[in-house]
Image (cartoon, rainbow, N blue to C red):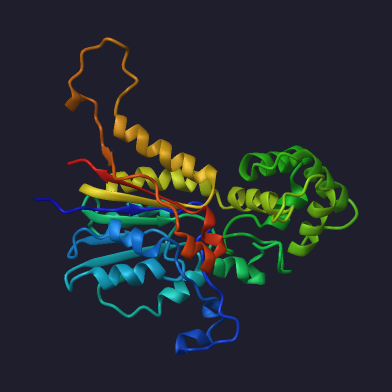
């Protein structure tokens, strides 16, 4: 018998609810916890993930702990959960979890293999969960600079202590660079026009706040989509680019495959097509194995180096979940199992 391991990843935004005026527990007294959340595809993800209640699991995106807490509920006393996050606010929230089976590490999920080695569990993980994207607490906190609906400093960094802020990038990048970010990472078809508007504006006054940028993009955008703010795609592109989210995802998938135990599951929840295409392509590649061999070369099936098995079809949130949490509507979950 072998233990099953699971990896979960989510497309687009991780979804959370904001609790406007409630302080229902002591930990809610902190600013970091003033934004409540409900994780997307919560029960489906954990049902796919936890196949061995005494195994070792890794939650690569702790966020505010929705998935991690449910994983712990499914584990026996000898089970273990390691959680990662690069956001200092998420680390603060995770310090409220008091469970000897739980360990929280401030690290981005692209380095999950490094953490697994440090903890002596590399190649022995019973599950890896990755919920990709930005969380509602990050979106709803104006000081983080992710949202075009709330005014705040134009930052957008998952870890505000590292890298370049959105304001710094927009102040120094060329028009062509800005357009590339809007188009490549935001899939904005009017990227050149929007980039030109940003550069024209910064020649008169720096662009330093979210609502300021949102208004520039709104004014310049020639074709608004019904029900969608015209700044949506450009903001998404900036965030993904600044945080290296697609590169992080590619690295995390590779690291998870190596860190999982034979028979382990990979579960991925993503929130937009750029992420989901990568997850789908990764699973398909490792399900097929070494298909690059010349046609006609005699190869046994066991020589193809097939490393994954797809588990079921992709899953999406139910109509009830979407009604309760509209940000869940674009979520896609994919599951695969590491071959023995």
Q: Nearer the viewer, residue 229 or 236?
A: 229
Residue shown at 87%/52% (left/top)? Answer: 201
Is residue 139 toward the left or the right of residue 234 in the image?
A: left
Above or below 74: residue 317 = above
Position of the C terminus, as image quadrant, is: top left
Q: Where is residue 255 in the image (x, y as percent from the top left)?
A: 35, 46
Above or below 259: residue 60 = below
Above or below 289: residue 206 = below
Q: Position of residue 254 (x, y in %)?
A: 36, 42
The image quadrant that residue 81 belongs to is bottom left
Residue shown at 49%/72% (left/top)? Answer: 37
Residue shown at 51%/52% (left/top)? Answer: 271
Q: Is residue 209 visible?
A: no
Q: Residue furthest top?
A: 296
Q: Which residue lies furthest to the left in this view?
A: 1
Q: Where is residue 218 in the image (x, y as percent from the top left)?
A: 80, 54
The image quadrant that residue 183 belongs to is top right
Residue shown at 25%/43% (left/top)? Answer: 338
Q: Can residue 184 be seen in this view?
A: yes
Is residue 251 toward the left or the right of residue 303 in the image?
A: right
């Amino acid at each position: 018998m072998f233990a099953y391991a699971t990896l979960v990843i989510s497309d687009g935004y991780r979804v959370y609810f904001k609790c406007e005026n409630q302080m229902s527990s002591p930990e809610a007294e902190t600013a970091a916890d003033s934004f409540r959340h409900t994780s997307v595809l919560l029960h489906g993800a954990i049902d796919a993930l936890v196949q061995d209640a005494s195994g070792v699991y890794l939650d690569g995106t702790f966020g505010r702990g929705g998935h991690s807490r449910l994983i712990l509920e499914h584990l026996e006393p000898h089970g273990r959960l390691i959680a990662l996050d690069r956001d200092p606010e998420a680390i603060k929230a995770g310090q409220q979890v008091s469970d000897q089976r739980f360990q929280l590490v401030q690290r981005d999920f692209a380095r999950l293999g490094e953490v697994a080695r440090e903890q002596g569990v590399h190649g022995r993980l019973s599950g890896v969960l990755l919920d990709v994207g930005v969380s509602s607490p990050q979106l709803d906190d104006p000081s983080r600079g992710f949202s075009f609906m709330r005014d705040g400093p134009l930052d957008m960094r998952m870890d505000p202590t590292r890298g370049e802020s959105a304001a710094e990038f927009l102040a120094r990048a060329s028009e062509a660079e800005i357009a590339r970010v809007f188009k490549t990472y935001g899939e904005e078809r009017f990227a050149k026009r929007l980039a030109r508007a940003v550069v024209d504006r910064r020649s008169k006054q720096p662009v330093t706040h979210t609502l300021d940028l949102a208004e520039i993009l709104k004014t310049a955008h020639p074709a608004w989509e019904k029900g969608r703010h015209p700044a949506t795609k450009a903001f998404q592109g900036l965030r993904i680019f600044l945080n290296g989210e697609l590169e992080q995802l590619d690295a995390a998938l590779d690291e998870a495959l190596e860190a999982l135990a034979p028979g382990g599951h990979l579960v991925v929840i993503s929130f937009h097509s750029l992420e989901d295409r990568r997850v789908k392509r990764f699973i398909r590649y490792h399900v097929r194995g070494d298909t690059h061999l010349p046609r006609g070369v005699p190869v046994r099936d066991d020589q193809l180096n097939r490393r994954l098995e797809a588990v079921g079809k992709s899953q999406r949130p139910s109509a009830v979940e979407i009604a309760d949490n509209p940000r869940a509507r674009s979520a896609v979950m994919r599951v695969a199992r590491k071959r023995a």
